């Protein structure tokens, strides 16, 4: 946006209308403009009219308390601290002076969804502007109080100081005057000279995660609360045929067993009793006739069917004089397997629906709570109120708790719908906790995909043609039936359709399957499978062309300076081409997604058929790293998350059911298997890119390419297994 | 149903419950000590690790009867003010991400510190290997334990 304002001082005009509009574009909305002059402050906190809240996120109290209403979800990625840093930087307060509180669902915050590695990069502009507007308002209030020009006033550590007289007023002391002033018309955002951005202060959420005081989805304590769990039909698309709960209900402390929209709910005094009751239920589930998942084993055959051309550039070259390379790759379904199983706390009473949810999508949680917690008459009223006032119904409240992992799973709100149905039925507060088995078998999985790659190489390994055909279930079609029409599905083909490497002809074809197996967004989504395929195949082409995989990529990246910088950084830091310990080999991969570029070099050994990853050297260009240590932590996390899928676990579906059930048959990477990860950040002063996901896609191909270097065996199926 | 007088974090708790009820749900659901987490219910993940007479114990598969006479220590009782060497090291190394497994990690590590006079990376890997973290904070956990060990054991730890 600054680009559109050719103002030499990097300052931008802000009028109320424009700020609203900009903020809407930037994924936020404001209380400004919808409230009359002099009464801008909003929310319950302002009931007595003493608080300054010129924007939804920032609230300044006369007692100098400065509250930041953090409207994204904290699921371990650390962005809550990063967002607070953005606010503190432009509000000119210390992070220690900011009281961060988790915002409930409220449309005034705009898009609260936390996914797509978007929290920091999506908030970079609007949150800093919001803080700057508040700061300028306080500066104006001080200038007015002292009857001095505003230019002589400086804001620092939550106080305004007048240069000439040395007079100082704390922000809280300026609230009453500031409340009477119009919004500033100009705000300037720092372009450099940051005091907080680029540093790594202690995470704000960390202390509560070292003493058990952090509150997750079922840690809320309410009077009269009961425990609940849900059993789902093991057959996707199947139905409950018979339920006999008499033995379960005979247990003392088991309250109710009943059907809900997704399965059978058990309500008891505590969670152990819900499990005892489950074991005594007589349940008969039946698969629905004609509804069965397409076996992944059939995908190879389906590759022969025509698909949808989702990308095409250039024209197919003549075959003469070119060398052909062809390979098939197969990737399984993947589960999110968050350490905290799906859970939610709810209370439906007196026409109110109260929900405490570990959710990545408060808006979806709201809509589920509204759908299942309100009567049809209430819902009609809600709809009218929502249309007229663009406002959430105060009778439906979504509080966001800490998330015990998200990785995309908690964008789907099935568990919120369940908790609300159960709470409404029993008319008492309930905490719903799924068993690990239910969580493993009723995920929204990363789709299984099978890929065929065909390339033609010209002189010196130049890519004359690249054809990528893939088969797999459509995520978008599963989540929003009919939404993809005759088109493809970017969620499945992303990372395959726009390649950085020079090639004369590219074609990507997708055989789109309608899935019976629930599909969803798994950390890095389509990039997770397509980067594996693309980066392994590039490695194959390098070897086919007789070239070093690094040199080959450099040759194909031509003038792409950002990509070359990240690739060279990873290679240099890893010592690519330098001698390694005996039996250790390097593999390389790179991928761009979510506004960032990542390259990784994996150092691997293979002994007795066992693949061991010793070191992973990562380079990341995520633009300005708001909190470099948090960025490094996310890369470490992405490598670990990706290695479970690379080396250890997969979800398989047999006879319409998921085979795996717990961490014994879906093992996660363990400490002894964790490589030493070092992360090097490219200094690139552009606006921040995403951080949570870009580290995932390169790890699987980097390891597979290292295994090839070690053994000469090209493993094209995940998880990687050496034959024999 | 049986009567229990439990010693948890140095305090006495009385309750009536089934002898088979796992310690995890006694802590969480009966006593409101929610710092200890449910992860798998089968003892596979370690999110529920507490100490029973100093021994790291998976509370999700430990019937209350089995620990009726033992001193139970949970994450809430590790220190009154986050001052345990591990809690300080956790902060120093910025270990926690989602945090859900971290009570189990810290309690497992605390037992490890008590048990060994010296700690090496190999010992830490061996003893912490069954405590799972989906966020992959392992590298920092290891560094934090080594830091805390240096603090606790002096220079004996590598």
Image: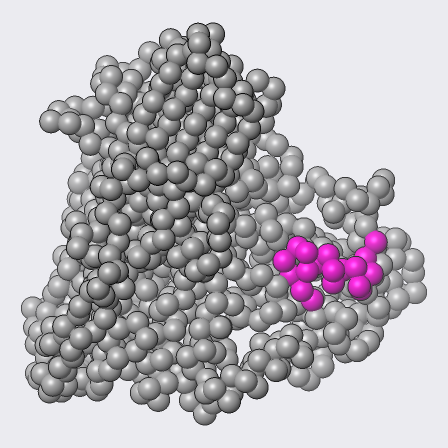
Q: Is residue A16 magenta?
A: yes
Q: Is residue A462 magenta?
A: no
Q: Is residue B124 visible?
A: no
Give the color scheme: rainbow, by chain, secondary structure or one colour.
one colour
Q: Is residue A708 above or below residue B74?
A: above
Q: Position of residue A616 (x, y in %)?
A: 36, 29
Q: Is residue A589 visible?
A: yes
Which residue is more in the foreground, A626 or A282? Answer: A282
Q: Is residue A650 left or right of residue A63?
A: left
Q: Looking at the image, how many numbered discs can be counted on the residues?
A: 0
Q: Is residue B30 above or below residue A657?
A: below
Magenta-tinted stretch = A13-30
Q: Position of residue B25 (x, y in %)?
A: 21, 72
Q: Position of residue A515 (x, y in %)?
A: 33, 54
Which residue is more in the foreground, A157 or A618? Answer: A618
| Residue A424: quarter of image | bottom left
Q: Is residue A41 above or below residue A361?
A: below
Q: Residue at x 45, y 92 (%)?
A: A350
């Amino acid at each position: 946006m600054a680009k559109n304002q050719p103002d030499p001082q990097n300052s931008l005009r802000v009028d109320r209308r424009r700020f609203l509009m900009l903020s809407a574009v930037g994924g936020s909305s404001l209380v400004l403009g919808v409230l009359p002059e002099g009464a801008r402050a909003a929310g319950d906190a302002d009931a007595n009219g003493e608080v300054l809240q010129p924007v939804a996120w920032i609230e300044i109290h006369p007692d100098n308390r400065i509250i930041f209403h953090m409207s994204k979800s904290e699921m371990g990625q650390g962005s809550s601290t990063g967002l607070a840093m953005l606010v503190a930087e432009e509000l000119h307060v210390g992070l220690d002076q900011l009281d961060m509180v988790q915002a409930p669902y409220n449309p005034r915050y705009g898009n609260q969804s936390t996914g797509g590695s978007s929290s920091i990069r999506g908030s970079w502009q609007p949150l800093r502007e919001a803080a700057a507007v508040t700061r300028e308002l306080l500066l104006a209030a001080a200038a007015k109080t002292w009857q001095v020009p505003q230019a002589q006033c400086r804001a620092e550590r939550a106080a305004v100081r007048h240069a000439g007289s040395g007079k100082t007023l704390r922000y809280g002391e300026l609230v009453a005057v500031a409340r009477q002033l119009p919004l500033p018309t100009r705000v300037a955002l720092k372009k450099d000279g940051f005091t907080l951005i680029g540093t790594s202060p202690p995470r704000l959420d960390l202390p509560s995660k070292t003493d058990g005081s952090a509150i997750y989805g079922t840690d809320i304590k309410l009077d009269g609360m009961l425990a609940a769990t849900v059993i789902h039909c093991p057959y996707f698309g199947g139905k409950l045929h018979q339920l006999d709960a008499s033995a379960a209900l005979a247990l003392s402390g088991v309250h109710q067993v009943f059907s809900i929209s997704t399965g059978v709910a058990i309500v008891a005094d505590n969670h152990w009793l819900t499990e005892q009751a489950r074991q005594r239920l007589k349940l008969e589930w039946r698969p629905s006739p004609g509804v069965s998942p397409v076996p992944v084993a059939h995908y190879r055959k389906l590759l022969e069917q025509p698909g949808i051309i989702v990308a095409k550039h250039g024209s197919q070259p003549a075959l003469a004089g070119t060398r052909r390379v062809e390979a098939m790759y197969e990737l399984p379904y993947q589960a999110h397997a968050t350490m905290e199983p799906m859970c939610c706390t709810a209370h439906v009473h007196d026409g109110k629906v109260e929900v405490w949810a570990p959710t990545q999508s408060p808006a979806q949680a709201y809509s589920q709570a509204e759908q299942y917690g309100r009567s049809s008459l209430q819902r009609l009223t809600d709809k009218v109120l929502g249309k007229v006032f663009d406002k959430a119904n105060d009778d439906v409240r979504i509080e966001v708790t800490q998330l015990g992992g998200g990785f995309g799973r908690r964008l789907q709100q099935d568990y919120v719908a369940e908790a609300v149905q159960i709470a409404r039925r029993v008319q008492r507060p309930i905490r719903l906790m799924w068993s690990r088995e239910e969580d493993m078998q009723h995920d929204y999985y990363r789709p299984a995909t099978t890929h065929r790659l065909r390339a033609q190489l010209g002189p010196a390994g130049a890519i004359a043609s690249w054809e990528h055909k893939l088969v797999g279930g459509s995520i978008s079609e599963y989540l929003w039936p009919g939404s993809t029409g005759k088109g493809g599905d970017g969620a499945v083909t992303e990372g395959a359709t726009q390649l950085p490497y020079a090639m004369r002809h590219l074609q990507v074809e997708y055989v789109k399957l309608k899935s019976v197996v629930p599909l969803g967004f798994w950390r890095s989504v389509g990039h997770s499978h397509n980067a594996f395929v693309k980066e392994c195949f590039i490695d194959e082409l390098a070897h086919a062309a007789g070239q070093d995989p690094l040199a080959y990529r450099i040759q194909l990246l031509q003038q792409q300076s950002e990509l070359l910088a990240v690739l060279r950084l990873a290679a240099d830091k890893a010592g690519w081409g330098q001698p390694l310990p005996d039996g250790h080999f390097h593999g390389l991969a790179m991928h761009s997604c979510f506004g960032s570029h990542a390259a990784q070099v994996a150092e691997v050994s293979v002994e007795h058929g066992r693949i061991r990853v010793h070191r992973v050297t990562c380079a990341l260009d995520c633009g300005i790293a708001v909190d470099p240590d948090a960025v490094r932590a996310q890369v470490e996390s992405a490598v670990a998350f990706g290695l479970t899928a690379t080396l250890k676990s997969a979800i398989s579906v047999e006879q319409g059911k998921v085979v795996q059930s717990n961490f014994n048959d879906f093992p996660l990477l363990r400490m002894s298997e964790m490589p030493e990860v070092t992360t090097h950040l490219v200094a690139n002063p552009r606006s921040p890119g995403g951080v949570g996901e870009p580290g995932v896609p390169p790890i699987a191909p980097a390891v597979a390419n290292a295994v090839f270097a070690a053994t000469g065996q090209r493993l094209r199926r995940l998880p990687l297994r050496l034959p024999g | 149903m049986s009567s229990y007088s439990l010693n948890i974090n140095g305090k006495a708790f009385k309750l009536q419950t089934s002898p088979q009820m796992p310690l995890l749900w006694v802590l969480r659901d009966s006593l409101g000590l929610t710092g200890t987490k449910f992860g798998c219910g089968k003892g596979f993940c370690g999110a529920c690790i507490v100490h029973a007479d100093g021994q790291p114990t998976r509370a999700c598969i430990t019937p209350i009867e089995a620990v009726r006479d033992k001193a139970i220590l949970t994450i809430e009782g590790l220190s009154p003010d986050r001052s345990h060497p591990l809690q300080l090291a956790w902060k120093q190394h910025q270990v926690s991400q989602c945090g859900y497994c971290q009570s189990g990690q810290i309690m497992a590590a605390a037992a490890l510190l008590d048990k060994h006079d010296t700690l090496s990376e190999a010992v830490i890997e061996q003893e912490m290997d069954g405590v799972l973290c989906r966020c992959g904070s392992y590298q920092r956990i290891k560094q934090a334990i080594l830091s805390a060990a240096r603090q606790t054991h002096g220079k004996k730890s590598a």
